[in-house]
Amino acid sequence: MDHVRMGVEGDYFGGGAPYGAPNFRARSPYGGPFEPDSYMRGPEYGVEEMVRRTNLAVHFANERVTHNMRYAQVHPAMCRDGRFPVDFRMPKTVEEVKVMDPSKLDRILQAYGLPADLRSLNLTSRDGVTWGHDPYDSIQPLSDFDWRTTEPTKLRPFKPRFHLTMALENITLAELVPIDKTYLSRIKLRRQLIAEHPLAVMAVNPRADEAVREMYEWIVGTYLPKRYPTMFRTFPAVEKAERVLRNLVTNEDVPLRPSTALSALQTLGEHVDDDFLFLLPESAPSAPNAQPRYRLEAFITCFPSGFSTLKKLNGTLAAIHGPVPGYPAKLERSMDRFFTNLPVGKAVKRANWTITTTDALFSQAGTHLYSGSSPGSPDADAANAKTLALDSTGLAEQIAAQRAAVSVPDCRLRCERQTLHRLPKSGAVVFAFKTYQYRLEDVKAEGSGEDLALAIEGFAKGSVPQMEFYKRGVVWGGKVREYLRS
C-alpha cells in the first residue's frame, strides 16, 4: 500500500503537456516514466498480485481526473494476464480519450471483458462501483418531504423533430419512485382498477416469482421507509412478531414479505403510483454466441397507454414493440444489448409523450393507429372504434369522423417517466413508468404552446415519419395545433 501511495501523492497525474505536443511524457501511476514492458519482467510477487497493485494505483490516479482536465493523463489498467490492451498500452490525455475512434474504444473495452456498448450508458469517472457500498441499501432520505404540497413533475420531452432513440439519462436508485400531491387520488384509482380489472392489470409467470418477491421486499422493506420516512415507517405488528410497513397516508399495514408473487404485485399497485414490468432473459440464446432475448414475465400496470399488457406477457422486446414504426431498424439491436449489459446498481430514465383525446389513465386501446397487420396489432376483443389500421376499409372517412369528434378541452398531453434497473439477486430487469397528464390550457399558459405545436408537426419531419399516424396525430393534430397557436 505504501508503494501505491508513492505514486498517488506526487505530481505525476496532474500536469502533462498538451495533447499532441512533442514533449508529452507518459508517466507511471507509481511515478517515473511509463514502461509497459517493465511490468512483465518478473516482479517479486506473482501476476495476480502485480495486477492488483497496479490497478489499485491506476484507480487512485484516474479518480483525480475529470473531463475538464484536458491534458491530465488517464492511465490504462492491467488485464488479468498482466498485460495492457494493445490499443491502450500507454497513458492518454483526456483530450486523446475524447477523440478516440469508436472502434478502438470497443477493442479496449473488449480487452477488459466489458460490453462494447458501455458508452451508451454515458458513464462518468464517478459512476464506478464503490467498494463496500450497496446502492440498493444506500437510499438518500427526503426527511422533510410533504407529499401534499409537492407538485407533479413537469415533463416536456417534445422536440421540433421526432427521432426514435433511447435517450437515456443516469439517475440514482433513490430517484426511482417520485411521489407528489396526486398520490392519494391516484392510489384510490389504482385500487379501483385492480378490483375491476385484475386480469388486465397484473400477472406473473412462475419463473418471475423470485424477481417479483425481490422487488417487493426491497421496495417495502428498504426503499419506501428510507426514501419517504414521513409517509412510510416500519412497526412491530400488533399480533405477530415480524415487522410491517405502515403507510401513514392510508393508515394501513403492509407485510414485509408477501404470501405470493401475485399478492406482491397487488400490494405494490395499491401503494406505489408507478407501474412495474419484469423482464427476464431466455434460459438459453436462440443461436450460438447470440445475446439472450428478454421476455416480459410479470407486470402490474394500472395505467397502460393504448395497449393490453396481458397480451404482451411472454413477449420479447421485439414482439412488445412490434407495432412501433421504426423499432426494428432504429432501436431493436441497441435495446437488446442494453438489457443484456445493464449492470446491477445502475438506473436510467427516459421520457415519452403523446396527445390523448380523453383523460382516461387506464386505456387498453384507442390511442394508436396501426400501419398494418403486425404482431401487436389490435384484435377484435382489444380494438375499439378509435383503433384503425392503415389498410382499414374506408380509412379516410373514419379518420375524418374521428377528427370531427375531437374535443380540445378533453385532450391531454400524456407523458411517461420511464426507468430501468436490474435486480441484484434474480437479475431481472425492471421497467417502471409513472404517468403524467397535463391540460393543454396549462401547457399553453406556461408558454410552451408553440413548442408543442412544432413538436406535433415534427412527427412527420423526424427519422420515423410514420410516427404521426401511429400516435393518431392525423386525427387530433390539426385541432390541437390550432388551439395551441390561438
Image: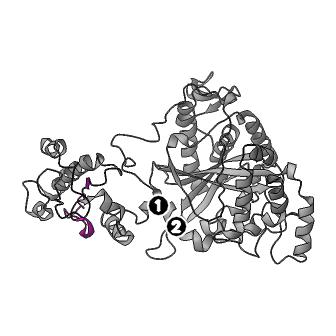
Amino acid bearing label 1: Ser
Per the rendering, the mark at residue 120 is: 1
Q: In this view, does 125 lie above or below 143?
A: below
- Mark on residue 134? none
Q: Give neighbour class at mark 1: few <14, some 14-19, many 20+ (Cα, 10 Å).
A: some
The answer to whether residue 310 is visible is: no
- The answer to whether residue 394 is above or below residue 265 is below
64 left or right of 128 in image: left
Identify the residue at horizontal 89%, vertical 54% (top origin).
407
The tag on residue 334 is: 2
Q: What stretch is highlighted in magenta?
A: 68-91
* CA separation in Å, label 2 and label 1: 9 Å
Residue 48 location (% of width, % of height): 18, 56
Question: Could you tell me which residue is drawn at 21 percent across and 54 percent down?
Answer: 16
Q: In this view, does 192 lie to the left or right of 136?
A: right
Please report contact status of discs 2 and 1: CB closer than 8 Å, yes or no. yes
Comparing 407 with 171, the one in front is 407
